[in-house]
Image (cartoon, rainbow, N blue to C red):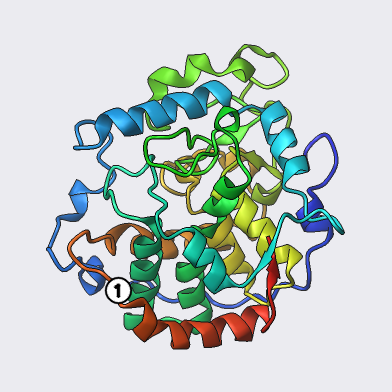
Amino acid sequence: MTKGATLEARATAPFLRTTAVPAADTIMHIKTANDKDVSAFRNYSDSALQARVKRHYRGMRQNQTVAFYEKMEEKYSFAPGKHRAEMTVREAFQALEAYVDSSDPDMDLPNLIHMLQTAEGIRKAGHPDWMQLIGLLHDMGKIQFLWGKREDGQEGTGEGAQWALGGDTWVLGCAIPSTVVFPEFNGLNPDEQDERYNGRNGMYEEGCGIEQLKWAWGHDEYMYRMLVANGATLPKEGLAMVRYHSAYPWHDKGEYGQFMKPGDEMLMAAVKKFNVFDLYTKDEGKGVDVDKVWPYYQGLIEKYLGTGPLRW
């Protein structure tokens, strides 16, 4: 565990069911309608949105520190009486209708469309309904922009500061690996100059487990905590898909292996499974009829999250 307190969300977590991760698909099952080659995704070198994306990651590397994480952890606490709003998932979707992710080099459309495309891709591939719901919910933590400030990197426009809402995450409190996107910005991080945090293990112990690490604050961590606080009856693998889908240094580049403990391989496999859909269902030329598909997803929301408004 970390050399400090356990995460509040873990301390209050409900019983988490464990289920088998669906077998892997071929990429062909979820190719986009415009047949965009899979190698064209996650282009961080010369995409049409390069300037915006590069600015986003510079901001992340300059500002995401252990101290900032602890500040956000307190701000977005789900302790009794500390939540910020009560609303249904549909109302939260309406709040996110115009939100565009400044960290995404693949598309320049509202995030709502991406979440629906992800959910529908998982549904059409025949995967369990809980995984379909994860596809719908996985990016909803970006709703933090409703309560965020520019100085905290939580603005709601594509050209605004969003460095604490989206983007690839890395572990705070230990050395930033060179495999992150835009590694040239690593030296801008204040914790890289702090001997408590700039070693290979930093503030952690080997074998502590992935769930004990503090990842760069964003929509992933917030949404995980929100689901736990609201008593979601989703499998542990589903919660991992939400919490770690942006943790590319871990699940894509193989970093942080020294911190893994038994069971973490299962979580990584789940995240890898989900991320195939998160990435390759993006299609700017294909929308989703929200009114047509919503009754189906409303049923899933009620099955796993109940029928009333949720705490956000």
Q: Is residue 56 shown to the viewer in this render?
A: yes
Q: Which quarter of the rendering shows the C terminus?
A: bottom right
Residue 307: x %, y % from top left: 67, 84
- State the residue at coordinates (61%, 73%): 88
- State the residue at coordinates (54%, 33%): 153
Q: Which residue is mark 1?
A: 288
- State the residue at coordinates (63%, 52%): 222
Residue 70 placement, left or right of 145: right
Residue 22: x %, y % from top left: 45, 76
- State the residue at coordinates (16%, 68%): 33
- Give, as a three-letter code, the residue at label 1: Val
Is 214 above or below relative to 111? above
229 or 143, which lies in front?
Answer: 143
Is 46 above or below relative to 36? above
Residue 138: x %, y % from top left: 50, 62
137 or 308, which lies in front?
Answer: 308
133 or 156, which lies in front?
Answer: 156
Q: Regarding mark 1 in the picture, which secondary structure is present there?
A: loop
Residue 47 placement, left or right of 138: left
Q: Is residue 205 shown to the viewer in this render?
A: no
Is 309 above or below relative to 227? below
